[in-house]
Image (tube, helix red, strand yellow):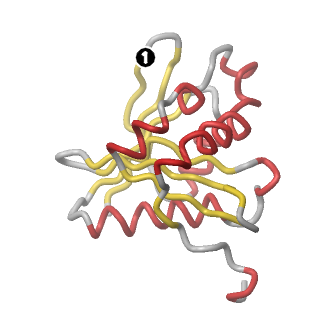
Amino acid sequence: MDEASSPAAPSPARPEDAPALKALADRAYAHYIPVIDAIPAPMQADYAEMVRDHEVWTIRSNGALSASLVLINRDDHLLIESIAVDPDSQGRGYGRRLLDWSRRRAVVLGQTDLRLYTNVLMTDNRAWYRRAGFAETHEEQRGDKRIVHMRLTL
């Protein structure tokens, strides 16, 4: 992929991006509602709070919000809270760019573990993260959802 066609570099979200981040999560995760028979967690997040309290990164295409990444820096790891890619923007490498960005941020923040969780029924997501080097560590029931925890040691 040449530079002209490569995905835009992630940039920090701004407080005024919160409504667009929520709308992006809704578009990106809506197809999972019938799969998991519940509302996915990223669709329920308070993005104003996320932008205020954590690292939220965005990729824009033609001025529109195309993808987002929410990172939470914990004592012993960096947590990927969510990666959302607009369905109209999938296949452009935005998800991979954000995943790679999370690895770089973990190193900058002095973390050696990158972790995430996803619904056990989101099999495409699980497979995508496994291909990226994450290992499933354990499952847990969280409210109305069964989640699987994943970890990548850097």
Q: Residue furthest left?
A: 75
Q: Residue furthest front?
A: 16
Q: Residue furthest top?
A: 144
Up-down: is 36 above or below 3?
Answer: above
Q: Residue at x 32, y 43 (%)?
A: 53
Taking depth in this image into account, of 40 and 148 the one nearest to the observer is: 40
Q: Quadrant of the N terminus?
A: bottom right
Taking depth in this image into account, of 12 and 9 the one nearest to the observer is: 12
Up-down: is 56 above or below 101?
Answer: above
Residue 7 position by quadrant: bottom right
Up-down: is 72 above or below 49?
Answer: below
How far across and how far down the image is residue 115, in percent?
37, 46
Secondary structure of residue under mark 1: strand
Q: Residue at x 32, y 57 (%)?
A: 153
Q: Specify whether 43 is left or right of 106.
A: right
Q: Quadrant of the C terminus?
A: bottom left
Amino acid at pointer 1: Arg
Q: Residue furthest right?
A: 88
Residue 61 position by quadrant: bottom right
The residue indicated by pointer 1 is 142
Q: Specify whether 105 is left or right of 21.
A: left
Q: Residue at x 24, y 63 (%)?
A: 109
How far across and how far down the image is residue 86, in percent?
73, 49
Q: Specify whether 118 is left or right of 127.
A: left
